[in-house]
Amino acid sequence: MKRVPQPPVKPFLRDVERHDFWPGFVAVVAGVVLAFCGAHHLTGLDTVAGNTATEIQLARAFSSGGLQYANELAPPPPPKLSDPAAEAEALDRWAKQQANATAPTWKVRVDTAAAAPCPT
């Protein structure tokens, strides 16, 4: 084997290797922000304490029996008519109440302190 002569090395003329800090830092910060926002996504459901429930709280409450269903008041029942003289007035009042009443809508509250195991 024959050695091939190499040119002299000039360190100040060599390309310097650099590792940039900022692109990686920005990517990590963006990932942390997305993970935090995704983990604390609000559902629009109220908790028993009055706050808005996160998806994690909703999933835990669902698996531990912590969902409470509360509905609005149902329309009033028809009046019991015992006096024929007041019958027409009572029926008119009841008809107005029925016209103003809306169908009950279901509201769900999340009990974050529920500890009962899932029944399934």
Image (spheres, rainbow, N blue to C red):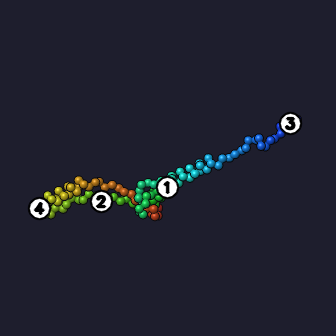
Identify the disc placed on residue 115.
none
Label 1 vs label 3, nearer the camera: 3
**The C terminus lies in quadrant:** bottom left
2 displayed left or right of 72: right
Picture quadrant where residue 116 is located: bottom left
Mark number displayed over residue 73: 2
42 and 62: which one is in front? 42
Q: Where is residue 9 in the image (x, y as percent from the top left)?
A: 81, 41
Sequence order check, earlier mark of 2 and 4: 2
SS type, badge 4: loop
User: Which badge, 4 or 1, comes first in the chain's sequence?
Assistant: 1
Name the residue carrying label 3.
Answer: 5
The mark lying in front, picked from 1 and 2, is 1
Q: Position of 93 compared to 21: left or right?
A: left
At 41% from the left edge and 56% from the top edge, which residue is drawn?
A: 45
Q: Nearer the viewer, residue 40 or 56?
A: 40
- Tell me if mark 2 has few (under 14), some (14-19) or many (20+) residues whose alpha carbon lies within 10 angstroms of its own: few
Measure how far apart labels 2 and 3 are at the Cα level. Answer: 97 Å
**Do the CB atoms of the residues marked 3 and 4 lie less than 8 Å apart?**
no
The type of residue carrying mark 1 is His
Q: Is mark 2 on a helix, strand or loop?
A: loop
Q: Earlier in the sequence, mark 2 or mark 3?
A: 3
Find residue 40 and name its label: 1
- Residue 118 visible, this orientation: no
Q: Distance between the residues labelled 3 and 4?
A: 125 Å
| Horizontal arrangement in the rendering, residue 46 relative to residue 25 (left or right) | left
Crowd band around label 1 with a 10 angstrom C-alpha radius: few (<14), some (14–19), many (20+): some
**3D distance between C-alphas at marks 1 and 3:** 65 Å
Foreground: disc 2 or disc 3: 3
Q: Which amino acid does label 2 sit on?
A: Leu
The residue labelled by disc 4 is 85
